[in-house]
Image: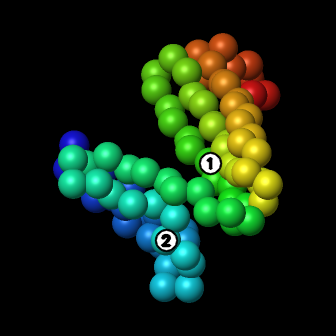
């Protein structure tokens, strides 16, 4: 479990490039929770990708400069794949 988390964090740091130039949007609380305080006129979007044995999902989320939330999800069922891979 620890090795998986460390690998995921390392991959995230490599993909984001120079993180020193990006603003801090996320805060880690004392209880281990993660919060995102939305500032006025600060548009931002991101995504999460999760996979399991029976389902995979990509969740895209964001906030516009006016504070409107946007959500979009894509579901894939790997066990229903056709050959060639047409998911």
Location of residue 18 in the rendering, given as x and y in whole percent from the top left corner: 52, 83
Position above or below: 45 against 78? below
> Which residue position holds label 1?
47
> Residue 39 vs residue 41: left or right?
left
Q: Residues within 10 Å of mark 1 (few under 14, many from 20)?
A: few
Q: Residue at x 46, y 26 (%)?
A: 52
**Numbered mark located on residue 24 in the image:** 2
Location of residue 76 in the rendering, given as x and y in whole percent from the top left corner: 66, 24
Residue 7 image-quadrant placement: bottom left
Q: CA distance from mark 1 to mark 2?
A: 16 Å
Position above or below: 70 against 10? above
Comparing 84 with 22, the one in front is: 22
Is residue 35 something one can see in this rendering? yes
Location of residue 47 in the rendering, given as x and y in whole percent from the top left corner: 62, 48
Q: Residues within 10 Å of mark 2 (few under 14, many from 20)?
A: few
Position above or below: 52 against 6? above
> Residue 71 vs residue 47: left or right?
right
**Numbered mark located on residue 73 in the image:** none
Q: Residue at x 69, y 31 (%)?
A: 73
Residue 77 image-quadrant placement: top right
Secondary element at tag 2: loop
Figure label count: 2
Position above or below: 64 against 75? below
Location of residue 34 in the rendering, given as x and y in whole percent from the top left corner: 38, 50
């Amino acid at each position: 479990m620890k090795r998986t988390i460390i690998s995921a964090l390392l991959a995230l740091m490599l993909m984001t490039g120079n993180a020193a130039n990006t603003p801090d949007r996320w805060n880690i609380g004392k209880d281990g929770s993660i919060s995102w305080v939305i500032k006025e006129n600060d548009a931002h979007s991101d995504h999460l990708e999760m996979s399991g044995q029976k389902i995979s999902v990509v969740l895209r989320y964001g906030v516009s400069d006016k504070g409107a939330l946007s959500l979009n999800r894509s579901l894939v069922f790997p066990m229903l794949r056709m050959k060639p891979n047409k998911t």
